[in-house]
Each structure stands twice: as C-alpha cells, then as structure tokens.
Amino acid sequence: MGIEDKTVAEVMSRVIHTISINATFSEIIEAFLEAKVSALIVVAPNGEFMGIISKTDIILAIKKFGNKVWEKIADDILCPNPYAIEGSATIKEAARKMLKHKVHRLIVVTPSGVGKFTPVGVISATDILREFAS
C-alpha cells in the first residue's frame, strides 16, 4: 500500500474547533482568538455539520455589515456548503478534491442520517504534504 492509498482518517487532524450556529459575532471572534485556527466548524445544537467560518469570512462580514456585524450570528456569515470528505476516502482523493475546488482544507465528516453529517476532523494540504515528506 502506497502513501497515496492511506485514508483521510489516518492522516486528518482529529482536533476540531466548533461553534454553534447561534453563536454571536463576539463569541465567534473569541473562539478564533482562543483556538488560534484559520477556520471554525459551525454545528447545529444536535452536532450536525452546518458550515464553516474562516478568517476571510470574518473580514467579508465586517465589510458587508459594518458596525451591524455585532448583531449577527454564525448562521448569518457562515459558508454553508464547504467542501467535505469522508474518512474512508484516500488522501489521493482528498488532494484531487482540494485541487479541483482550489481549497486548502476539507472537513472530514461521517454520515449521521439521510443527508446529514457530523464533523470528525479536518484534513489540510499540509497534512497530505507531511505524509509524502515523512
């Protein structure tokens, strides 16, 4: 089995930073500062994957809403359809998906019902490169 046949689950980061879909803008900023990450995974109260908020999304929200941004919640500024992949996929499949969609990370999900997913990790381009370099 070659490196490219390793699964996403074998390589992904299992440390994920989530925030509620109802979190206020202030709570979102606090979460970014505490977690020191470039993106937060947004979940529903039942843990269902709803989207992602990146630092870029924060900047765009400030630009779009101005001072009214402090009245917004995660649901108002999240990216609702970020690219995701299941842990059983290979890192080669993950790399192809990242290249196709020009993204640096994929949210790793597991099915949790019909058309519903729960986030279980994140795989980044750096994670994949690290595998090839080791």
Image (cartoon, grey):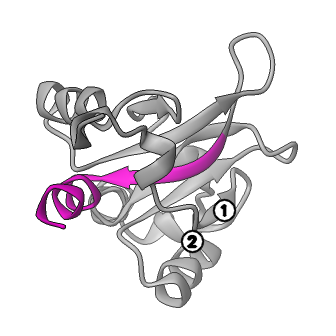
- How busy is the neighbourhood of tag 1: few (under 14 within 10 Å), some, or many (20 plus)? many
Q: Residue at x 24, y 52 (%)?
A: 128
Q: Amino acid at mark 1?
A: Ile
122 left or right of 66 in image = right
Magenta-highlighted residues: 119-134
First-in-chain label (1 vs 2): 1
SS for dot 2: helix
Residue 61 drawn at (x, y percent): 37, 57
Q: Nearer the viewer, residue 55 or 15?
A: 15
In-front residue for pair 41/11: 11
Q: Percent x, y for residue 91?
A: 30, 38
Residue holding disc 1: 19
Q: Which residue is mark 2?
A: 28
Residue 80: percent from left, percent from top? 49, 33
> Marks 1 and 2: CB-CB under 8 Å?
yes
Q: Which mark is residue 94?
A: none
Decide whether residue 103 is among the magenta residues: no
Q: Residue at x 36, y 40 (%)?
A: 6
Q: Is residue 25 left or right of residue 60?
A: right
In the image, is 88 to the left or to the right of 118?
left
Asked if residue 122 is among those painted magenta in the image, a careful observer would answer: yes
- Density class for disc 2 (Cα within 10 Å; few <14, some 14-19, many ≥20) is many
Q: CA distance from mark 1 to mark 2?
A: 7 Å
Observer-nearest residue: 68 or 90? 90
Tell me the quarter of the image containing the C terminus: bottom left
